[in-house]
Amino acid sequence: MSTEGRLADLTAYLDTYLRVRETPDEPNAQNGLQVENNGAIQRIVAAVDASQQTIDGTGAGSLLVVHHGLFWDGNPRLTGRHYRRLKALLDRDIALYAAHIPLDVHPEVGNNALLASALRLRDLSWFGNYRGIALGVAGKTSVASRTALLAEVERAVGGASGSARMVPGGPEQPVQVGVVTGSGGSMMAAARDAGCDTLVSGEGAAHTYFDAMEWGLNVVYAGHYATETLGVRALATHLASRFGLSWEFHDHPTGM
């Protein structure tokens, strides 16, 4: 039986634990509490996206913790799908909390640190400048080949065999692997400059294929969504344990 928690306490803790106010991000991320409820929280629900499907499947009185919040397209008008999402939250008295870059870079429950740990990288260090902070995590790998690393990535993100793709621009036996989840293909040059021969990410633009081949980098793309399930799960586990609440993960994979 879960213990009812107070939204104000949960939000204050999350803001501090994730360093929400100090961590730079895109303006439309709107990190922190995006929608409040009556203040009583009965459970934690974790999801990657604040989609209609996620909201419709969330029970009344929940704190829905997501990586991608309501306002990514920058549209402040409460019409159309924006109205429908907000109405569903208010009708069920669901509070919504979003954490984008603050969750990517967190050393304990962050997407990048968790994926690096799941890949069993060692001698970890941070790299890449994102608005003045280091974003990626790099470390040494013991895998014997690119093929073995690809299988490790699929295992780490819970993907089926063949779900991740390799751009084989680097050495057959990787040594130094950088991790930037989500759309981290844009950090390829930063990974190269940090001494990585391989970058693991979610997705990248079409031109990153040629960047990888011509810069001598292996790049693994395992899916934006798949690489960003780790953080919200870990955060919900941590939060539920600290506040004596139950939690659940709502999985709505995009295949992208």
Image: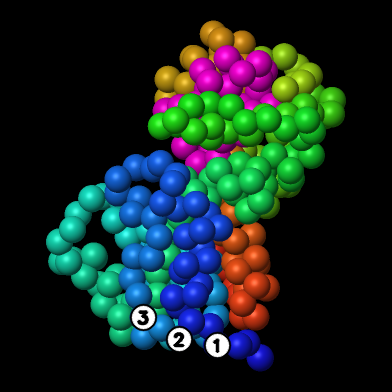
Q: Secondary structure at mark 1?
A: loop
Q: What residue would you read off at disc 2?
A: 40
Residue type at numbered disc 2: Ala
Residues tagged 3 and 1 counted as in contact (Cβ below 8 A): no
Task: Give the residues drawn in magenta, as a range.
Answer: 177-205
Q: Say which residue appears at 56% left-offset and 58% top-offset.
A: 17
Look at the picture and state if 82 lies above or below 154.
Answer: below
In-image side of 111 versus 97 (left or right): right
Task: Determine which residue is flagged by label 3.
Answer: 37
| Contact (Cβ within 8 Å) of mark 1 with mark 2 | yes
- Decide if residue 200 is in sight here: no
Looking at the rendered structure, the kind of residue marked 3 is Asn
Q: Where in the figure is residue 76, as x and y percent of width and height?
A: 18, 58
How far apart are the two marked residues, 2 and 3, measured between alpha carbons? Answer: 7 Å
The part of the image, by quadrant, that contains residue 138 is: top right
Q: Secondary structure at mark 3?
A: loop
Hey, which residue is sitting farthest bottom in the picture? 1
Label 2 sits on a secondary structure element that is strand
- Determine whether label 2 and label 3 are within 8 Å by CB: yes
Q: Quadrant of the N terminus?
A: bottom right
Above or below, 96 against 165 in this view is: below
Neighbours of disc 3 within 10 Å: few (<14), some (14-19), many (20+): some
Q: Nearer the viewer, residue 132 or 235?
A: 132
Bin the neighbour count of mark 1 within 10 Å (Cα to Cα): few under 14, some 14-19, many 20 and up.
some
Q: Which residue is mark 1?
A: 4
- Rendered view: 255 above or below 12: above
Q: What separation in Å lies between label 1 and label 2 (alpha carbons)?
A: 6 Å
